[in-house]
Amino acid sequence: MDILEKIRQYRIERGWTEYQLAEKSELPQSTISSWYRKNQLPTIPSLSKICRAFNITLSQFFTEDMTQIKSLTQDQADLIQNWNRLNEDQQKAIINLMKTF
């Protein structure tokens, strides 16, 4: 697994710049940039902050394919993947919509 590429993919899926990821993860942009310039891996605490910004767990980050989580149906795995692409306001809107049912 290419961790830096996966971070980049999550960032691009959300339409975030490196600067926006730095703000949302509360990490210095220079730290994130240096990972790519020097081809260094983030520390676990830094990766945890990155995952928090993406609203995913470390476990989800390291799961190559959500269908590998045996307890989830394909529909549930798809739902989680789509959920993780939403920003916080969009997630709140979905939760409010679900509460009306």
Image (cartoon, rainbow, N blue to C red):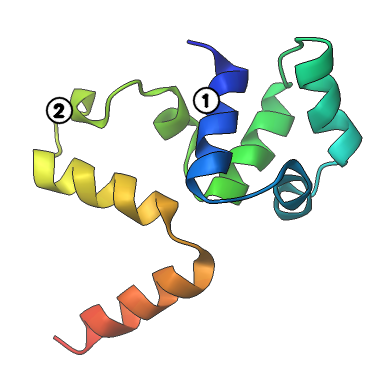
- Can residue 79 be seen by looking at this rendering? yes
**What's under tag 2, amino acid-wise?**
Lys
Residue for badge 2: 70
**What's under tag 1, amino acid-wise?**
Lys
Give the quadrant of the C terminus: bottom left
Determine the image quadrant of residue 12: top right
Residue visible at 14% across and 35% down in the picture: 71
Q: Tag 1 or tag 2, which sits nearer the N-term? A: 1
Measured along the vertical axis of the image, is residue 100 above or below residue 50?
below
- Classed neighbour count for the residue bearing mark 1: other residues with Cα under 10 Å, few (<14), some (14–19), many (≥20): some
- Can residue 73 be seen by looking at this rendering? no
Residue 100, horizontal then vertical, whole percent:
20, 90
Residue visible at 67% across and 24% down in the picture: 44
Determine the image quadrant of residue 74: top left
Report how far apart the C-alphas of labels 2 and 1 lie in the structure. Answer: 22 Å
Residue visible at 58% across and 41% down in the picture: 11
Local SS, label 1: helix
Residue visible at 72% across and 47% down in the picture: 25
Residue for badge 1: 6
Q: Is residue 66 left or right of residue 14?
A: left
